[in-house]
Image (tube, rainbow, N blue to C red):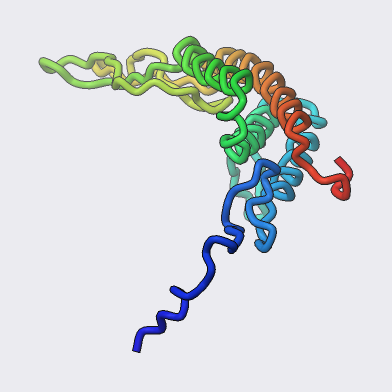
Amino acid sequence: MVDESWEEEDTDSKEFVDEVSESAEYSPKSDFSKAQIVYTQIEKCCLLRSEEMKAGYSTHIVDKMGNVKLVYIPDARKKFIGAVNALMNLLMPEVKRDKFCKESVDELRILETELKKKYAYKEKKVIIKDTKQQLVYTGREYIPEVGEILTVGMKPIKKGVMGENKVEGFWDSKVNAYYNELLEAYDIIFSELNCLIDKLNYFKQKMGF
């Protein structure tokens, strides 16, 4: 038998605890605390930004067996940018309700597109057409890793045969310029997100913010 006792509840006097409050504590009866998650993410952003903003790089190490391995050291700029992106996504409902902050985020997205277009590497490869080797664009454009081996042209590999001329780190100066400019933009956004949090009185006093 279906229990229909719920129909007798006085819904007019019942408080709906699942409504989202402006203080970002979604429900007074919920164990979920968005404010605590945001607080933790801000701490992470601050710790990452306190480090020296070194570019990533590749290095070779020799293991105990004598094998040479390529190891990539993470880019500190990318780690900070990623952390701020995560914070921005967490605060997106609040960002969208604040005209100034929303405009800043929209401008950041436009800048990201412009910088990628400015510094992207246009991938190339060698194909055979009419029995001749030709260097053509694949159509893929992206920001390489620092130290990445890229095709920059053609070179003879044996008599009458041309192949790809690959150079390690060929695009490094452009990659570093890209992340340096992006870092400046994300510094500004991080500051504005903190101003937004302060304006909304986001954290309770007991959290010490």
Taking the image as shown, residue 158 lies to the left or right of residue 33, namely left
Q: Nearer the viewer, residue 155 or 176?
A: 176
Taking the image as shown, residue 51 lies to the left or right of residue 120, namely right
In the displayed structure, 178 sits above or below 65; it is: above
Q: Residue at x 34, y 14 (%)?
A: 154
Taking the image as shown, residue 46 lies to the left or right of residue 80, namely right
Q: Nearer the viewer, residue 180 or 27?
A: 27
Image quadrant where residue 99 sits: top right
Q: Where in the figure is residue 117, as x and y percent of width and height?
A: 44, 13
Q: Residue at x 79, y 34 (%)?
A: 46
Image quarter (top left, top right, bottom left or bottom right) of the N terminus: bottom left
Taking the image as shown, residue 165 lies to the left or right of residue 204, namely left
Q: Residue at x 59, y 63 (%)?
A: 14
Residue at the outermost top position: 118
Q: Residue at x 80, y 37 (%)?
A: 47
Q: Where in the figure is residue 164, as x and y percent of width and height?
A: 35, 20
In the displayed structure, 15 sits above or below 126; it is: below
In the displayed structure, 78 sits above or below 167; it is: below
Q: Where in the figure is residue 84, as x and y percent of width and height?
A: 66, 33
Q: Is residue 74 visible?
A: no
Image quarter (top left, top right, bottom left or bottom right) of the C terminus: top right
Q: Is residue 192 visible?
A: yes
Q: Nearer the viewer, residue 64 or 77?
A: 77
